[in-house]
């Protein structure tokens, strides 16, 4: 069996960039968290593992993604709307990094 495509991660990061660019401070972080949870569920499914939202949050938390990503993202939210490009870059990089960590976890255990 071939490895699942990492396009799941790239699609989630692109959606995260759009979310970061259009939503105001506060709503953006909550929406990005939902995006990351959905990405983890999709990565799990690609490896044949069924996860619910609680399990997906656990995977993200274990990888340190929720703490690190949230802290970095909140730090660049100062000076909105002038920080929109920074928010987009941080959202994209954070989701890509989280996705790659989660992908490697599933690849190691189930790939």
Image (spheres, rainbow, N blue to C red):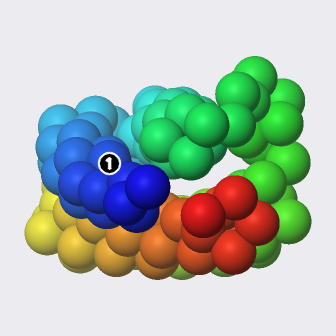
Image location (x, y in percent) of residue 34: 54, 32
| Residue at x-position 69% and y-position 75% | 108
Q: Does residue 91 appear to the left or right of 62 in the view shown? A: left
Image x and y of residue 46, in percent: 48, 41
Asked whether residue 99 appears in the rendered view, the answer is: yes
Q: How many marks?
A: 1
The residue located at (29%, 57%) in the rendering is 5
Can the viewer see residue 90? no
> Which residue lies at the image location 40% right of the left edge and 62% below the top edge?
3
Q: Looking at the picture, does residue 61 appear above or below residue 12?
A: below
Task: Check the image and report above or below for 54 versus 105.
Answer: above
Residue found farthest to the top: 52
Report crowding for label 1: few under 14, some 14 to 19, many 20 or more residues within 10 A (C-alpha): some
Question: With 63 as the anchor, is 65 left or right in this view?
Answer: left
> Viewer-proximal residue, 47 or 84?
47
Secondary structure found at label 1: helix
Left or right placement of residue 87 versus residue 100 in this view: left
Quadrant containing the C terminus is bottom right
Location of the N terminus by quadrant is: bottom left
The answer to which of 65 and 83 lies nearer the viewer is 65
Per the image, the residue denoted by label 1 is 8
Q: Camera-side residue: 80 or 39? A: 39
Q: What residue is drawn where x is 23% and y is 73%?
A: 89
Q: Quadrant of residue 96?
A: bottom left
Residue 70 percent location from the top left of the image: 61, 62
Query: Residue 29 appears at what percent x and percent y?
Result: 51, 45
Relative to residue 91, is residue 81 drawn left or right?
left
């Amino acid at each position: 069996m071939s490895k699942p495509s990492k396009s799941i991660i790239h699609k989630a990061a692109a959606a995260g960039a759009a979310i970061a660019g259009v939503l105001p401070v506060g709503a953006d972080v909550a929406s990005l968290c939902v995006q990351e949870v959905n990405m983890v569920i999709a990565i799990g499914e690609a490896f044949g593992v069924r996860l619910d939202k609680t399990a997906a949050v656990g995977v993200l938390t274990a990888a340190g993604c929720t703490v690190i990503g949230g802290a970095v993202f909140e730090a660049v939210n100062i000076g909105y709307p002038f920080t929109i490009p920074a928010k987009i870059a941080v959202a994209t990089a954070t989701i890509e990094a989280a996705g790659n960590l989660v992908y490697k976890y599933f690849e190691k255990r189930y790939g």
